[in-house]
Image (cartoon, grey):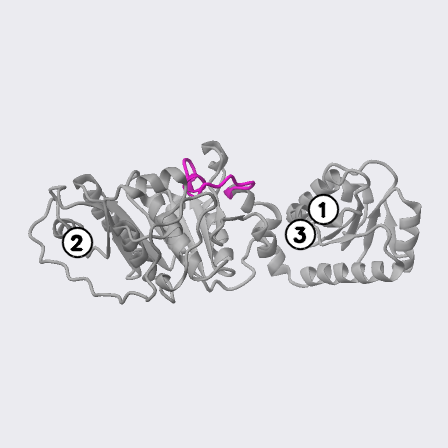
Amino acid sequence: MSLIVLATASADLELRIQRATDGGCVTLPLGPLPHNATALLTELDMDVPPGVIVLDSGVDPQPALDLAVDFHQQYPGISVILVSERGLEIGLEAMRAGIRDILDPASNVSDIRQMLGRAGEAARAHTVQPAAVASATAPSAVPTGRVISVVSPKGGVGKTTVATNLAVGLALTGRHSTVLVDLDLQFGDVASALNLDPEHSLPDTLYGPASRDTMVLKTFLTLHETGLYVICGPKSPAAGDSITTHQVSHLLQMLASEFSYVVVDTGPGLSEHVLAAMDDSSDLVLVTRMDVPGVRGLRKELDALTELGMLSDSRCVVLNFTDTRAGLSVADAQATIGSAIDVSLPRSKTILRSVNQGIPLLQSGGRDPMAKALRRLVDRFAAPPLAMVKPVRAKGSRTPDTQPDAKPQPRRASRWPRPRGSVA
């Protein structure tokens, strides 16, 4: 049996736990809980670390929760059990802290024995897998979902609008199938684009138990009313400074093991974090706008990705703000980019209203040309087509003028005119 340590001020609880362990439990001296895990283990002064630690939360569970977080970060092989009569109330917070189980202080000896047995088995399983301990940040399952990174060489091209509509569209094809990650570490505005006020943001998913356990990770996600899960960007530019590329890769792999689609809204340019996301992506959506700086910028980005060996065939080029009066044709853009334009998004008056309201076009429905073009983008990745799914109307929003077509629209092969010249 794993060595069990108990921290409690209750003589009755100590007696029942001693009976459940046949006297094999070590009890800490009475007093406040140590501030960190190392201090607690030092106080024990044992050659062999315990397998299970039982923390009696008393009236205020916060010190025990904080201590549990430290144990999960410093000693992930030790199972922590929290004693509290407020299990239903603090269950979610306890899971986020990495607590193995919550023990009701009124539990009988038989129930205590079973719970301690499960915790001990978990500790032993961790001990006999040293490789897993050494790489505690390794994904728990093989990634199976598609990771779709939405990238652009410059800001102001509508990348976040494309990413949020793509994510919402995919979520509507299968509820709880899609997660959207805001990887713009300085000025990400996915939360604003979806009218969300998140409790947690990207940094919260990269540290502690959430970085090791997909079940805990899911408790840090924000649920949108369409069924889309969202990881919003850092709340300030400074909050994203400590995020590493390894953490980004690990997070995307964990999400891909749980969701069918992982849509990543990256920051503009080719920063190390963007490259890390692209390296873990199955598909790329490259977005630019229909003007000379935007088209030339995308050409440079494509050339750079080619040199890095990161430009695969699983890419989709999106030309935003297309307008026949712009003095630049789709054929001109294609000739300069050196690649076909897969989806053209027309300039639209409704998109500005959509952005200001925080309601993506594909959430509100309708037959606006921009919405139809966005559905074609979603159809490149989704099965069945988006047109088969009824969208969810936002609370308090106006009823859409129209609904999606009853029948899925057939995909038509793109017929681009022969390039007439280049703006390079």
Residue shown at 80% from the left, 59% from the top: 116
Let me know if residue 16 is in the magenta part: no
Question: At label 3, which amino acid type do we have?
Answer: Pro
User: CA–CA distance between discs 1 and 2?
Assistant: 58 Å
Q: Which residue is nearer to you in this view: 305 or 20?
A: 20
Name the image quarter holding the N terminus. Answer: bottom right
Give the side of residue 5 with respect to residue 200, left or right. right
The mark that comes first in sequence, 3 or 2, is 3
Assign a secondary structure to mark 3.
loop
Q: Which residue is nearer to you in this view: 182 or 424?
A: 182
Question: At label 1, which amino acid type do we have?
Answer: Glu
Eyeballing the image, is 396 above or below 383?
above
Assign a secondary structure to mark 2.
loop
Q: Are marks 3 and 1 in contact (CB under 8 Å)?
A: no
Residue 213 appears in which quarter of the rendering? bottom right
Q: Which is in the foreground here, disc 3 or disc 1?
A: 1
User: CA–CA distance between discs 3 and 2?
Assistant: 51 Å
The mark that comes first in sequence, 3 or 1, is 3
The mark that comes first in sequence, 1 or 2, is 1
The 10 Å Cα crowd at callout 1, few under 14, some 14 to 19, many 20 or more, is few
User: What is the x, y in percent for residue 388?
Assistant: 38, 64
The 10 Å Cα crowd at callout 3, few under 14, some 14 to 19, many 20 or more, is many
Range drawn in magenta = 184-202
Q: Give the residue pinned by disc 2.
A: 338
User: What is the x, y in percent for residue 41?
Assistant: 77, 44
Residue shown at 14% from the left, 46% from the top: 324
Let me know if residue 197 is in the magenta part: yes
Q: Give the residue pinned by disc 3.
A: 76
Assign a secondary structure to mark 1.
helix
Q: Which mark is residue 228?
A: none
Q: Give the residue pinned by disc 1.
A: 89
